Image: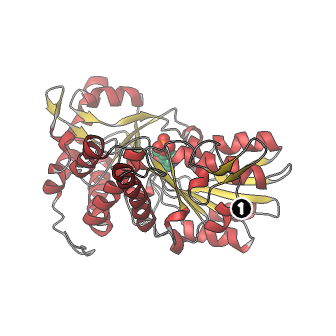
Amino acid sequence: MSKVTIDRIDFDVRSIRKQFPLLAQSVRGKPLVYLDNAATTQKPQAVLDTLSHYYAAGNANIHRGVYALSQDATQAYEGARSKVAKFLNAASPTEIIFTRNATEGINLVAQTFGRSMVAAGDEVVISEMEHHSNIVPWQLLCEEKGAKLRVAPINDDGELILDELAALLGSRTRLVSIVHMSNSLGTINPVRRIVDLAHERGIPVLIDGSQAAYHMAVDVRALDCDFYVVTGHKLYGPTGIGALYGRSRLLNDMPPYQGGGDMISSVTFEQTTYNELPHKFEAGTPHIAGAIGLGAAVDFLTEVGFDAIASHERRLLDYATGMLSELPGLRFIGTAREKASILSFVLEGVHPHDVGTVVDTEGVAIRTGHHCTQPVMDRFGVPATARASLAMYNTTDEIDHLVSALSKVREVFG
Ligand SMILES: *Cc1c(COP(=O)(O)O)cnc(C)c1O
């Protein structure tokens, strides 16, 4: 498939679905309607084949092996790094560090950049809509250093209040760490504006791209951000693999994260010198198969194309928003002007967990809970929400299934 254009309206969702074997199954005697993509996406055959081929025919430990199998595995692993670099438009593959997930990418920055740059009285700025993975690592750091975590507020639509964020940036701010797209609200933040505001004051910016990266094209150089994290299992890739993009100037100056094999250049009991980028940050045998699988996933995403994905998901979101708005007693949490692919809501008089349980009996998988964003729940005064989240393989038919399953909730709970 070659590159598609934005006005392509015949996005062939059926042929996309055929590439995801899991979607064909039935659950509780009903066709599965999978709408929990913000938690994890399903895997296309190309990724499954890559994983099984690697273990069946290509498995060997990487780096330092002189035999063909090891060299091939090394090439595939480093090839995957190049694919991820290209996917994010990094200047060089050496700016891509493989991690276990987005959470580890953020912890890596907190424990290396953070521990060396943040001192007592300094500040780290985040927002009220962050995932716990972009809150707790900074709390741990601030606690250790006697630094302060500052939180930029959001408005009633779930939009970041940019002026308030700007007002928090000062001479003690060492880092801004902000989500690109919220997993509980769907809000897309103006991250390029935030980077500009921070850079005007010489403050680096980390962007949590866990959600954004499978809905829209990400260009770390156009964003001009200093760090960007993604997580493989939401990118239609394997679990246990993620990537951290870091500007090489910063990565070079940062101390190592974990010590061990592969991250060293030489070791004596007196002194150890560290390997060059990116290996300095990858101690021990990495998730070789995962990285190669992630490479296949970004190939798949590139082949389908974000123009096609985004316009299909936009149509689905508009359709779903319209349909759900007609349900009596439904209140959306997260109505930002700039949002994508996420419908978080509460049904008056019904606990979100009950909503999830009833729609499950109809084969519809949605998530209920705080979505690892408890401060967002507090902000909106709800204990939890029900969340339907869309991916490229979802259809308007599935939205209809969700709506009729939600009508059942009303029948059950009155
Ligand atoms: C999923 C998610 C994370 C955490 O991803 P992991 O794969 O669990 O590390 C962080 N931030 C956002 C916005 C997310 O959606």
Amino acid under disc 1: Asp
Q: Position of residue 121 (x, y in %)?
A: 86, 51
Residue 304 to residue 50: above or below: below
Secondary structure of the residue carrying numbered label 1? helix
Residue indicated by mark 1: 253
In the picture, residue 192 is in which quadrant?
A: bottom right
Crowd band around label 1 with a 10 angstrom C-alpha radius: few (<14), some (14–19), many (20+): few
Q: Position of residue 333 (x, y in %)?
A: 46, 46
110 and 372: which is toward the camera: 110
Q: Position of residue 255 (x, y in %)?
A: 71, 53
Q: Residue at x 28, y 59 (%)?
A: 300
Q: Is the residue indicated by label 1 positioned so its CB lies within 8 Å of ligand 1? A: no
Q: Looking at the figure, which quarter contains the N terminus?
A: bottom left
Q: Position of residue 34 (x, y in %)?
A: 26, 40
Task: Answer yes or no: is residue 196 visible.
Answer: yes
106 and 128: which is toward the camera: 106
Taking the image as shown, residue 274 lies to the left or right of residue 364, namely: right
In the picture, residue 402 is in which quadrant?
A: top left
Task: Answer yes or no: is residue 129 visible.
Answer: no
Taking the image as shown, residue 279 lies to the left or right of residue 52, namely: right
Q: Residue at x 44, y 52 (%)?
A: 211
Q: Residue at x 23, y 30 (%)?
A: 408
